[in-house]
Amino acid sequence: MNFIFKDERQLIKYVIKLADENKFELGFIPHHRYEHYFRQGKIIMEFENGEPCGFFLFNRKDNVIKIYQACIEYDLRRLRHGENLLRKIIFKAKKEKAKVISLYCMDILEANLFWKACGFQFCCKRAGGSEKKVSHNHWIMWLDEPDGNTLLKAHTLSPVAQVKKIIITP
């Protein structure tokens, strides 16, 4: 990242704007939480010609890095920005000795093809929320040999997950 913002508030405002524009796909997080996550280093960003063009919001729990939101500007998708962000997450996860990266993606989104192409494995589905009623695919990427304890932690990060089927393929 070569571009330096003089005011991190610009970056936070950008993340909020992009998240609001993609609220249906990303889900809702209160605006003040983005600032909290940003200051904790839980938002990584990607840039195109010195301007922000996307972000991943993530957290770590035990041996699992969970990506909660992944969003790239619509007209800048397919230009490897998502892959660049994913490389940053993988680097961070390996550095911190995490064993798996986990995320949920709405079943109807083309982003599922992206996660699969990047090497994520389909784990299971969970029922959608009461509003959208769209199921979510659970994708995982093993960074280390899977073990039962890590699999359980990767799967139970979302307390509302309703497991239909689990496929374990290291």
Image: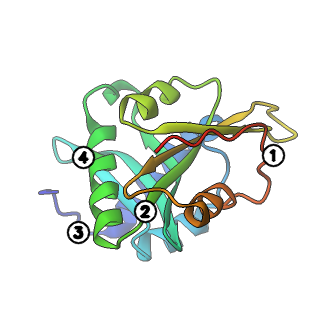
Q: Position of residue 135 (x, y in %)?
A: 74, 33
Dot 4 alpha-carbon crowd within 10 angstroms: few under 14, some 14 to 19, many 20 or more: some
Circle nearer the N terminus (4, 3) = 3
Task: For mark 2, give the secondary structure.
Answer: loop
Residue beneath disc 1: 162
Q: Is residue 149 left or right of residue 90?
A: right
Task: For mark 3, give the secondary structure.
Answer: loop
The amino acid on which the numbered mark 4 sits, given as a three-letter code, is Phe
Q: Position of residue 81 (x, y in %)?
A: 28, 38
Q: Residue at x 36, y 25 (%)?
A: 75
Q: Is residue 72 left or right of residue 23?
A: left
**Whether residue 47 is situated above or below residue 79 in the rendered picture:** below
Q: Position of residue 101 (x, y in %)?
A: 46, 54
Residue beneath disc 3: 6
Circle nearer the N terminus (2, 3) = 3
Camera-near label (1 vs 3) is 1
22 or 129: which is nearer to us? 129
> How much space separates mark 1 and mark 4, taking CA atoms?
36 Å
Residue beneath disc 2: 99
> How much space separates mark 4 and mark 3, taking CA atoms?
15 Å
**Whether residue 115 is situated above or below residue 68 in the rendered picture:** above
The amino acid on which the numbered mark 2 sits, given as a three-letter code, is Lys
Quadrant in which residue 7 is drawn: bottom left
Residue beneath disc 4: 47
